Image (spheres, rainbow, N blue to C red):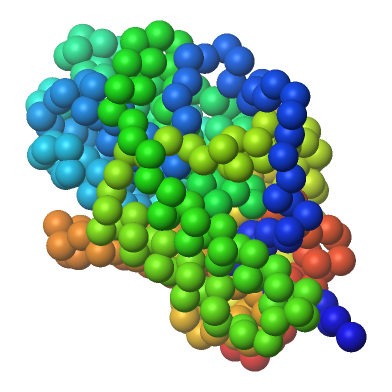
């Protein structure tokens, strides 16, 4: 008799029922107002865009995923870093000075919340004067606002849905379509992730007794992408899935889950580090801060709640950034996505509150 195992967070599972074929013409209507090119990974989309821009020096936030830094370096860019404040806003003075030497300014909108409009306006004016190209990383914010002050944007869509691969580079300028010439076909990354996601479903549904097989497969996929950083196009399967998503329901579910969890956490030894929800934001995670983050992460894992860390500091140039460590070194991202309902969120809140009561 099959059983259903509980697991909150981590990679999305896929069932064999998801492996359907669609015969009708497909499109992703959310970005209809933009010219767009779909890739297998966000770093592939970013590398293709950087290759087209053909710059030499880039300005990145110091609070960033290492894979983004590597994408710039793989395309031959020299990197400078600007500071992100404790509230995830851009420290404007550090940018205004450094942008004078930059061909590209890279902007992130963290966890779904766009940067302040006044700051973005100031940055755009400085970049326009200096002929600096703005690239927005909208991986966290695409379903809040697809573009703010830049011409170009990249987003890793597989972070939002049960897709084995999928990312997009898009723009109001049709010149972005030129990056299609850099594309190749390489299905190894996609296939590893697809098998891993199917294996996760098999384990959760009770039809497999191998609790770690999907983890090793998914880790192998990420390792492959790191060692073979190709500019592969999106797979046919992920494209089909992407075009069939119910985005309105997804956004409403995430907002509801975020608000419930935000209100249920007791605000003791754990601090909520992400903002209150406004009317337009679609959040990616709810972020908490705990002095004993690793102990909290392990405690949550013991209760089948799996939370990512955004992000471990891996770059040697940032290791001595004390402000970065003090303000983001204890952050943990709590899942609030569309796989879960109120019951799951109340369970997550109860576990968080239980940890606090032990502190």
Report whether residue 80 is seen: no
User: Quick one: quadrant of the C terminus?
Assistant: bottom right
The picture quadrant where one finds residue 344 is bottom right
Q: Residue furthest bottom?
A: 358
The picture quadrant where one finds residue 31 is top right
Between 226 and 274, which is closer to the camera in this rendering?
A: 226
Count every numbered label the image shows and give the total: 0
Is residue 146 left or right of 279 when viewed as pictured? left
Between 127 and 273, which is closer to the camera in this rendering?
A: 127
Is residue 65 left or right of 6 when viewed as pictured? left
At 42% from the left edge and 54% from the top edge, which residue is drawn?
189
At 27% from the left edge and 53% from the top edge, which residue is drawn?
228
Residue 35 vs 79, above or below: the answer is above
Q: Position of residue 83 (x, y in %)?
A: 28, 45
Residue 56 vs 352, above or below: the answer is above
Is residue 46 left or right of 170 when viewed as pictured? left
Q: Position of residue 258 (x, y in %)?
A: 72, 52
Between 295 and 208, which is closer to the camera in this rendering?
A: 208
At 68% from the left edge and 59% from the top edge, which residue is drawn?
14
Is residue 210 left or right of 39 when viewed as pictured? right
At 59% from the left edge and 49% from the top edge, which residue is drawn?
163
Q: Position of residue 159 (x, y in %)?
A: 54, 49
User: Quick one: quadrant of the N terminus?
Assistant: bottom right
Report whether residue 27 is seen: yes
Q: Position of residue 22 (x, y in %)?
A: 73, 34
Residue 161 vs 211, above or below: the answer is above
């Amino acid at each position: 008799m099959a059983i259903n195992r509980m697991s909150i967070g981590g990679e999305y599972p896929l069932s064999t029922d998801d492996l359907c074929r669609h015969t009708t013409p497909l499109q992703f209507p959310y970005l209809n107002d933009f010219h767009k090119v779909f890739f297998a990974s966000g770093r592939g989309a970013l590398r293709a865009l950087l290759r087209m821009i053909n710059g030499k020096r880039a300005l990145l936030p110091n609070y960033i995923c290492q894979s983004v830094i590597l994408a710039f370096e793989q395309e031959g860019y020299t990197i400078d870093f600007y500071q992100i404040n404790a509230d995830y806003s851009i420290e404007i003075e550090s940018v205004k000075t450094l942008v004078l030497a930059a061909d590209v300014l890279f902007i992130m909108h963290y966890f779904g919340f766009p940067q302040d409009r006044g700051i973005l306006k100031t940055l755009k004016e400085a970049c326009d004067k200096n002929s600096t190209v703005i690239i927005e990383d909208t991986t966290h914010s695409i379903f809040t606002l697809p573009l703010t002050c830049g011409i170009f944007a990249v987003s890793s869509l597989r972070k939002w849905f049960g897709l084995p691969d999928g990312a997009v580079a898009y723009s109001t300028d049709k010149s972005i379509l030129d990056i299609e010439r850099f594309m190749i076909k390489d299905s190894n990354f996609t296939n590893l992730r697809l098998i891993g996601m199917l294996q996760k479903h098999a384990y959760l549904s009770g039809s497999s007794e191998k609790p770690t097989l999907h983890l090793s497969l998914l880790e192998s996929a990420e390792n492959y992408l790191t060692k073979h950083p190709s500019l592969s196009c999106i797979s046919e399967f992920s494209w089909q899935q992407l075009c069939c998503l119910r985005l309105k329901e997804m956004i409403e579910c995430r907002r509801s889950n975020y608000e419930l969890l935000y209100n249920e956490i007791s605000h003791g030894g754990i601090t909520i580090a992400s903002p209150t929800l406004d009317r337009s934001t679609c959040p990616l995670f709810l972020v908490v801060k705990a002095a004993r983050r690793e102990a909290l992460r392990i405690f949550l894992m013991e209760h089948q709640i799996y939370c990512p860390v955004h992000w471990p500091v891996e770059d040697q140039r940032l290791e001595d950034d004390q402000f970065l460590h003090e303000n983001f070194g204890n952050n943990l991202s709590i899942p609030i996505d569309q796989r879960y309902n109120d019951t799951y969120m109340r369970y997550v809140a109860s576990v968080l509150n239980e940890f606090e009561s032990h502190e």
